Image: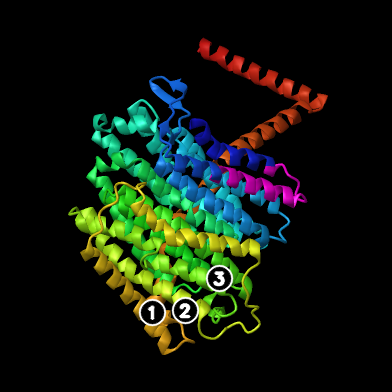
């Protein structure tokens, strides 16, 4: 079992390493390596899930005084389910990318980077030691930078890649400090040992470490206030958007909080902070999605909002509900992004204002994306209905302040989700085509089959609620369930009524003066620019000027002074002999005069 568990990250990593050495012209070899890495990992994950594997290894690697660092992995049905989700999406993204990037000269390194990205996420999933987990965490950050900036012909791609890297690194600093703090005080970085010893750890250490790790999780999962990088990451290829948003990097933060839940359960302050972050994020992102015109940005803001539901599940101490939503979100969000790629291919634009009327000519794209939107809204019995209801049901039943925040923010977000998903669905597929020269058609088989495959878990992942894998799901209660369905229906109905009144108009126009505020996501980017970016740049300029004028100036002026003195000395040494004799005679006369004066002074 342990060998198979290690194979999950190692096989795609090794094949990705070979892929990075593959010449650019060997496209088929690169594609084969990418598919093989994800395929073997998927087969391994499925086998572990079917067998119900449950085992933990503990291999001590090195000791730093009293602190142990090891290469340990952990597998159980929940871990296996996450691994299946990661590898399924990765395999379908690799398959989809073969056609999507058919004319890309740099496809070979792209496929290898996707494989390495997948391996890094799988290492985070199976690691039972915080040090290997941190390695996977950092590799994901590097791969995201490379993949978001893959399209060198797109002007905004390099900026988006740098922004994603820098913003997530801010959180990663906290993550690293939290890991070190926890490991030093626990005497080990082994997750199982740390969680077993939580009752014996100082409460202040648990609170500080938990909040520092939360900062890293918020950065990776694009939660407030480190959420601003994710919508800009849409500059990356659409398959990468599906990979990052559905099953890898964005899900990693929520997954780490799931693994470390006892640390947060021991400190109610931590869960309250998580609840506040989740509440602000889910509402803010849903409002931004409601006003966006770019289809991929709508889905990006939706991801930010839905991941906040996972954080909400952690805040109300419903870890299985949070994990359930992670799995269902992986299915329907990957489906939505890959469908969006097919739609963008038809109209050669990301803007919904250029879409419309695409339903009749592309039935596979229409029906699969309809399923994705329905799951996002939470239409029963699709996956999103069960997973979202499980989180809100847990929040409803709890009496803590954290649960109240999650419940009320969640209800508002459910209504907004119904509104923005319906708006995007109607604007994309119904009404008149706003791009007359659009070639409306379903994508070719390599892009079509991933849509069909992902439609299956989008419908069927809800069965996990009854399959015995997620054993600690809260019971379904009719009261909160009815409230959630009613609120969701109100959001759908409001958006449909506005569209029905004028199919050519954008329902978001009804927002009035609030629309620019929503479009700019409450000016969070501008606030970060004013409060962080500009002061940092000003401090950097001042530091550079001080370095140039004071530090460099002192060095350069000392050199100038030395040169001047040397020049004067050299000049003095180059005086002619007459001048030297004259100077000697003058000195002798001067000495004589001083001696005579001293003599007469003594006599007197």
Question: Going by the image, does 523 lie left or right of 561?
Answer: left
Q: Which residue is mark 2?
A: 426
Task: Provide the residue span drawn in magenta.
Answer: 19-42
Nearest to the eye among marks 3 and 2: give it: 3
Q: Nearer the viewer, residue 51 or 108?
A: 51
Could you say where residue 339 lies in the image, as x and y percent from the top left? 55, 67
- Considering the whole magenta stretch, tell me its main secondary structure: helix
Q: Residue lying at the far top in this picture: please name it.
A: 603
Distance, label 2 to label 1, CA atoms, is: 9 Å
Q: Nearer the viewer, residue 577 or 185?
A: 185
Q: Earlier in the sequence, mark 2 or mark 1?
A: 2
Residue at disc 1, secondary structure: helix
Q: Residue lying at the far left in this picture: please name it.
A: 399
Question: Going by the image, does 326 lie left or right of 261?
Answer: right
Image disc number at residue 116: none
Residue 260 seen by the camera: yes
Question: Going by the image, does 39 lie left or right of 281?
Answer: right
Q: Are marks 2 and 1 in contact (CB under 8 Å)?
A: yes
Image quadrant in which you'd find residue 447: bottom right
């Amino acid at each position: 079992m342990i060998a198979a568990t290690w194979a999950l990250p190692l096989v795609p990593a090794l094949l990705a390493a070979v892929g990075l050495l593959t010449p650019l012209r060997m496209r088929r070899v690169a594609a084969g390596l990418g598919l093989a890495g994800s395929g073997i990992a998927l087969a391994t994950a499925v086998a572990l899930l079917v067998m119900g594997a449950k085992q933990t290894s503990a291999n001590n690697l090195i000791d730093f005084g009293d602190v142990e660092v090891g290469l340990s992995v952990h597998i159980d049905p929940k871990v296996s389910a996450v691994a299946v989700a990661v590898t399924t999406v990765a395999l379908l993204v690799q398959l989809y990318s073969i056609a999507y990037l058919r004319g890309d000269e740099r496809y070979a390194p792209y496929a290898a980077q996707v494989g390495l990205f997948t391996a890094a996420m799988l290492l985070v999933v199976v690691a039972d030691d915080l040090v290997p987990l941190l390695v996977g965490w950092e590799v994901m950050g590097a791969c995201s930078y490379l993949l978001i900036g893959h399209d060198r012909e797109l002007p905004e791609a390099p900026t988006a890649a740098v922004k994603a890297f820098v913003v997530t690194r801010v959180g990663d600093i906290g993550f690293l400090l939290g890991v070190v703090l926890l490991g030093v005080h626990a005497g080990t970085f082994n997750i199982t040992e740390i969680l077993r010893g939580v009752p014996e750890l100082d409460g202040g250490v648990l609170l500080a470490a938990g909040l520092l790790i939360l900062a890293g999780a918020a950065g990776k999962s694009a939660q407030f206030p480190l959420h601003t990088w994710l919508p800009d990451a849409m500059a990356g290829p659409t398959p990468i958007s599906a990979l990052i948003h559905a099953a890898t990097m964005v899900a990693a933060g929520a997954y780490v909080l799931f693994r470390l839940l006892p640390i947060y359960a021991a400190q109610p302050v931590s869960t309250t902070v998580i609840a506040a972050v989740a509440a602000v994020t889910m509402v803010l992102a849903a409002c931004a999605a409601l006003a966006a015109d770019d289809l991929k940005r709508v889905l990006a803001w939706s991801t930010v909002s839905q991941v906040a539901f996972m954080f909400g599940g952690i805040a109300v101490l419903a870890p299985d509900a949070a994990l359930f939503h992670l799995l269902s979100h992986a299915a329907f969000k990957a489906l939505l992004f890959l469908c969006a790629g097919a739609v963008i291919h038809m109209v050669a634009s990301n803007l919904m204002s250029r879409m419309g009327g695409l339903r009749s000519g592309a039935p596979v794209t229409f029906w699969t994306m309809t399923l994705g939107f329905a799951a996002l809204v939470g239409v029963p019995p699709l996956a999103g209905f069960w997973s979202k209801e499980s989180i809100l049901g847990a929040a409803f039943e709890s009496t803590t302040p954290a649960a109240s925040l999650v419940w009320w923010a969640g209800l508002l977000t459910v209504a907004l989700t119904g509104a923005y998903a319906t708006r995007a669905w109607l604007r994309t597929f119904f009404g008149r085509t706003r791009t007359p020269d659009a070639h409306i058609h379903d994508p070719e088989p390599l892009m079509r089959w991933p849509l069909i495959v992902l439609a299956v878990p989008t419908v069927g992942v809800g069965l996990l609620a009854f399959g015995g894998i997620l054993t600690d799901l809260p019971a379904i209660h009719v009261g909160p369930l009815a409230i959630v369905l009613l609120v969701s229906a109100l959001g759908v109905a409001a958006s449909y009524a506005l569209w029905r009144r004028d199919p050519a108009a954008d329902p978001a126009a009804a927002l009035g003066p609030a629309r620019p505020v929503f479009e700019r996501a409450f000016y969070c980017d501008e606030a970060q620019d004013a409060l962080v970016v500009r002061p940092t740049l000003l401090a950097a300029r001042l530091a550079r000027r001080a370095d140039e004028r004071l530090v460099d100036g002192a060095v350069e002026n000392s050199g100038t002074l030395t040169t001047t003195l040397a020049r004067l000395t050299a000049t003095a040494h180059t005086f002619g002999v007459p001048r030297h004799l004259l100077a000697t005679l003058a000195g002798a006369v001067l000495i004589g005069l001083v001696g005579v004066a001293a003599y007469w002074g003594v006599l007197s």
